[in-house]
Amino acid sequence: MTSKLEQLQNILTPVIEALGYRCWGIEYISQGRHSVLRVYIDHEKGIVIEDCETVSRQLSAVMDVEDPISSEYTLEVSSPGMDRPLFTLAQFAEFVGEQVKIRLRSPVEERRNFQGLIRSVEDQDVVIQVDEYEYLLPIDLIEKANILPNFE
């Protein structure tokens, strides 16, 4: 049984990649009768508004045909930005050494919020250093994670 998010990823990722972009991540926020489908795209040359418009038009057409969301929703196509969200173990591995802010679905060692340095990825866990402590955070427990931009 695939989740709504997995279903959306299976439909949208090939379309995004066919256009020459990387599907950075997908968020589906169900808010009663009106939901938000947020799609993050990336490209080695960066993302400009025209890229978002191109991808948005294609995704809208595919969504109209496939119709995976029965209720009303808003489609947002965006660059991940400087405070980019992290969705996968591979993305965490790509940003080892960066500062990150993580919120968990359920507590680890009686905490749900962590801010620290990404040390490594081991099996299905993200290793984060907060002050002098290291925490192993299972990827399945991570509700939201964002890179903290460094402006130095």
Image (cartoon, rainbow, N blue to C red):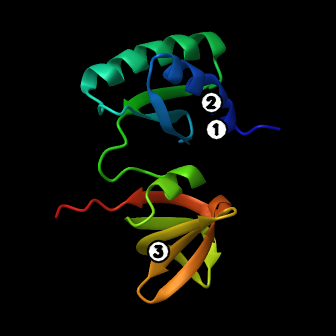
Mark 1 nearby-residue class (10 Å; few <14, some 14–19, many ≥20): some
Q: Is residue 11 visible?
A: yes
Number of residue marks = 3
Q: Nearer the viewer, mark 3 or mark 1?
A: 3
Q: Looking at the figure, which quarter contains the N terminus?
A: top right
Give the vertical position of 31 relative to 64 (above or below): below
Amino acid type at mark 1 = Leu
**Horizontal and vertical percent for residue 61?**
51, 10
Q: Report which residue position mark 3 lands on.
A: 114
Q: Secondary structure at mark 2?
A: helix
Q: Secondary structure at mark 1?
A: helix
| Residue that protrudes farthest toward the left in the picture | 152
**Horizontal and vertical percent for residue 111?**
55, 80
| Residue that protrudes farthest toward the right in the picture | 1
| Residue that protrudes farthest toward the bottom in the picture | 132
The residue drawn where x is 67% and y is 59% is 140
Real-space Cα separation, disc 2 to disc 1, in angstroms: 5 Å
Q: Secondary structure at mark 3?
A: strand
Mark 3 nearby-residue class (10 Å; few <14, some 14–19, many ≥20): some
Depth check: give the residue in front, 100 or 28. 100
Give the vertical position of 119 relative to 13 (above or below): below
Q: Report which residue position mark 1 lands on.
A: 5
The residue drawn where x is 72% and y is 39% is 3
Q: Quadrant of residue 152?
A: bottom left
Q: Report which residue position mark 2 lands on.
A: 8
Lower sequence index among marks 2 and 3? 2
Q: Is residue 134 left or right of residue 99?
A: right
Q: Are marks 2 and 1 in contact (CB under 8 Å)?
A: yes
Amino acid type at mark 2 = Leu
Amino acid type at mark 3 = Phe
**Horizontal and vertical percent for residue 29?**
53, 42
Depth check: give the residue in front, 49 or 132. 132
